[in-house]
Amino acid sequence: MSINLGYWTPVYGGFLRNVTDEGRMAATWEHIREVSVKADRLGFHTTLVPELYLNDRKGVEAPSLEAWSLSAAILAVTDRLRVMTAVRPGFHLPAVLAKTVSTLDSIAPGRVSLNVVAAWWAEEARQFGGNFPAHDERYTQAKEFVDVLNGLWEQTPFSYAGDHYEFEGTIVEPKPSSHPVVFAGGESDAGREAIADFADAYVMHGGTLDEVRSNVADMNARSERIHGRPIAEFGMPAYVIVRDTEAEAQRELDRITTVDPDSPGYASFEEFKRHSNLSLEVSRREYSVGTRGLRPNLVGTAEQVAERINDYAEAGITLLLIQASPLDEELERIAEQVFPLVPQEALATALR
């Protein structure tokens, strides 16, 4: 089984909630450009660009970068990297987003994909005027949002009448060169059922091998029942620590997971738990990097980490989205030491 190795773009400047100084990592285009160009050169497959208008890692008053303008810049300075940009339907008009995606595809044909996020941060929605309905209704809205995107990418003119959106004779030209892959994630039963209906691919939080196997089986069964086919891709974020010895890796893990409940990002972590129907309790240790990125336990020597990644490939993960700090240095280390030990799909074929 092969697995594609990608990474998570740190729009908030860094991944670590308990570590104030992450060296060169900063919420600036200069840093993101450096990481993007290097990752593209090294052969990383995909980057996920999260959409957050407030900084949930370093505290709401800290700077963070806007996802869609940043994605356009990343696509313009790279040649092969696929850019998966997160989108919250409550913050966008679907027809405008369809036009945006078509334009990005003209910049980088076949390298644009989406991660549709039902949203969880009520305070962010309040500050920025986002639409924030009840939990299950956010997935209904997301399904309609994707239905409109698909319709506008396939038909001219396009009309639609739903509970959240209504369009009559809308024209979006040009169309994307190929259908952008639509990822989505969610853990509630309502969320999973909606995602199996409207999404091509599923992205989950970090989990154990048993949790991943269960998620893959469940989502494939739902997709088979609705569409007669399995989910196209399964993505998972994971925080990766590769060192020359297991002891060195463990020391780094201990350093980044010393939790301070008074740290700036802790309030948003608590709100995330309140507004999400999670399938398991999230520990304060996992709070340290978010997205349950430490749960897969990709910590150790290159051989140990590669063996674990290959186990996740066998469990059904097709795309690993790496988090690490400092990101540019760690991506280089992972490409040099881990890539040779992990079978990956050829990039040109993957993005065709």
Image: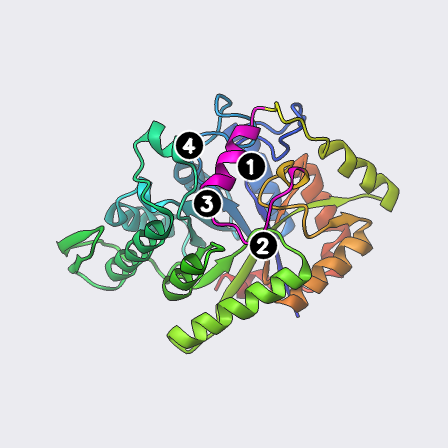
State the CA–CA distance, disc 2 to disc 4.
Answer: 22 Å
Marks 1 and 2: in contact by CB < 8 Å? no
The amino acid on which the numbered mark 4 sits, given as a three-letter code, is Tyr
Describe the element under mark 1 as helix, strand or loop: loop
Q: Which residue is mark 2?
A: 236
Q: Earlier in the sequence, mark 2 or mark 1?
A: 1
State the CA–CA distance, disc 1 to disc 3.
Answer: 16 Å
The amino acid on which the numbered mark 3 sits, given as a three-letter code, is Leu
Indicate whether residue 177 is drawn in magenta. no
Q: Which residue is mark 3?
A: 75
Residue sitting at 34 percent across and 46 percent down? 134
- Residue range in magenta is 264-284
Closer to the eye: label 3 or 4: 4
Q: Which residue is mark 1?
A: 10
Q: Is residue 295 left or right of residue 100?
A: right
Q: Earlier in the sequence, mark 3 or mark 4?
A: 4
Q: Which of the 4 quarters of the picture holds residue 131?
A: top left
